[in-house]
Image (cartoon, coloured by chain):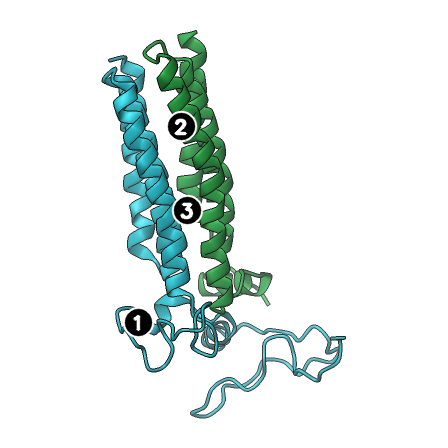
Amino acid sequence: MIIVANVLIGAGLFFLAVSTFALLIMPDLYTRAHAVAKSETLALILLFGGVLFRPELDVPAVGRLLFILAVSVIANPTAVHALLRASHRSGALPWTVVDQRIADAELGRYQP
Amino acid sequence: MSPFIVFALLVVAILIAVALYRVWAGPTVFDRLVAVALVSVNGVVVIVLLGVALERPNLFFDIALGFASLAFLLPIALGRYFEDRDDGTSQDGHPSASGRPQPLGIVPHGWVADRGRRENLRRAERSGVHLPAPSDPDDPGPVPPAEGRGPQVPLDGPDDGEGRS
């Protein structure tokens, strides 16, 4: 039982690391938030699912944890969506091929 | 206190430190807010794992529930607050953060949103990239930089009103 819990917690940590490093390496807000919102939601499901199998939890704690999981899974993508909608209405445009070309040229990697 | 939970807590602490780089680097307010949302999710994870590690799950899960609810409200409220339409109003029609003149003055103009195309044209002129117009078969080549004025040609060709129904 505790093996299952630790494996699930480890998988959740992996996806949390994926979302954090996507925050560093993606080129603009929209790609970044795309990667972050999805993988952090999956990481929460895996992590809390793993914590459910820990022997420290009793029945009320399991109920509370499931409630936190429901709130978080609904709330996190909603919050990121609200941020992206505000950014889009503020006039920020998504990353395109042209932006990639300009970035490559600034790094000296673009051959016209 | 199982050693695996302590290891997981250390990993999440490192991830919070890494995500705080994006809060520091920006470049816009919304970048920072997305990073703050991720940091607060990591904070909820830290509280839940602490409850397991200290064997007081009921106490810590209540705290985590309150923290998760507040972390949900913060990006939504601040996203609506920093929203900045072209006419200088926010979603509710009130003057927004950039809105010329800036009513609150706490956020510099470029921090809200870099208005993509103009900035891209400036960067393209600076780095000498040839940006072909997609609907132009005989493209005249790179646009020479205008003297003392902004860029003359939009990035996707002159807007002749066609192609939109």
| Residue with the most extreme top position | A1
* Three-letter amino acid code at the position of disc 1: Pro
Is residue B156 shown to the viewer in this render? yes
Q: Chain of mark 3?
A: A
| Label 2 – label 3 distance at C-alpha | 15 Å
Q: Residue at x 59, y 61 (%)?
A: A97
Q: Nearer the viewer, residue A92 or B118?
A: A92
Q: Chain of mark 2?
A: A
| Comparing labels 3 and 1, the label whose residue is closer to the camera | 1
Among the two numbered marks 2 and 3 on one chain, the one whose residue lies closer to the N terminus: 2
* Three-letter amino acid code at the position of disc 3: Leu
Callouts 2 and 3 in the same chain: yes
Q: Nearer the viewer, residue A101 or B59?
A: B59
Q: Secondary structure under badge 1?
A: loop
Callouts 3 and 1 in the same chain: no
The numbered dot on residue A23 is: 3
Return the x and y of residue A83 as percentages of the image width and height. Answer: 45, 55
Is residue A29 shown to the viewer in this render? no
Chain assigned green: A
Chain assigned cyan: B
Residue B15 vs A48, above or below: the answer is below
Q: Nearer the viewer, residue A32 or B129?
A: A32
Q: Quadrant of residue A43?
A: top left
Reading the image, the residue beneath label 2 is A13
Reading the image, the residue beneath label 1 is B108
